[in-house]
Image (cartoon, rainbow, N blue to C red):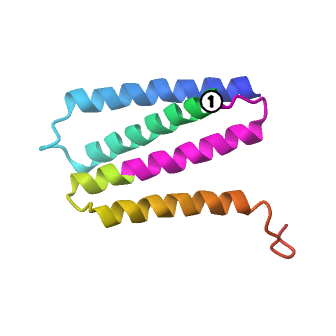
Amino acid sequence: MILSLLFFTFALFLFSAAGLSVSITSVNPYTAGPDQLSLFYLAFWLTATAVLTLALYRLRPSRSAKLYGRHLRVAALTSGALTLVLILLSHRLLSITNTLALAAATVLLELFFRSSDKISFGRFK
């Protein structure tokens, strides 16, 4: 099970890195439309998610699919925050307070996911 997840993550990395390299080398950012820029940001997010997932798995290998899911969630949240920072930088809307608020929101969201296993929601266990 875990080997198929790792294979899927590696395949996702290869395809998204190829899409990212094509959009970097062939698209002029000054004349690109919103669809081309959104494909660039999507490829960047997928590449960062795959790289971070593989790196987290390499740091703490396990045969558990649940731990792999945690690695995937942390990688997706972190790469989503990096992608949002990149989008805000491209529109010149990023300040230090926005960056700190985005980092705090990412950390709080991860802490919520880690504590949701311990919290009892009445009949929604």
Name the amino acid, label 1.
Leu
Instruction: Say above or below: 45 vs 121.
Output: above
Foreground residue, 83 or 100? 100
Quadrant in the picture for residue 18: top left
Residue 88: within the magenta? Answer: no
Q: Determine whether, in the image, residue 40 is placed left or right of residue 30.
A: right
Q: Quick one: quadrant of the N terminus?
A: top right
Q: Secondary structure at mark 1?
A: helix
Q: Quick one: quadrant of the C terminus?
A: bottom right
Where residue 116 sits: x, y (%)?
A: 73, 63
Residue 63: within the magenta? Answer: yes
Residue depicted at 76% across the width and 42% down the height: 66
Q: Determine whether, in the image, residue 80 is placed left or right of residue 119.
A: left
Instruction: Say above or below: 84 vs 25.
Output: below
Q: Residue under circle 1?
A: 59
Where residue 97 sits: x, y (%)?
A: 33, 66
Q: Residues within 10 Å of mark 1 (few under 14, many from 20)?
A: few
Quadrant in the picture for residue 47: top left
Where residue 38 sits: x, y (%)?
A: 32, 47
Residue depicted at 49% across the width and 48% down the height: 78
Foreground residue, 82 or 22? 82
Where residue 111 sits: x, y (%)?
A: 63, 60
Q: Which residues are magenta?
A: 59-83
Instruction: Say above or below: 115 vs 80.
Output: below
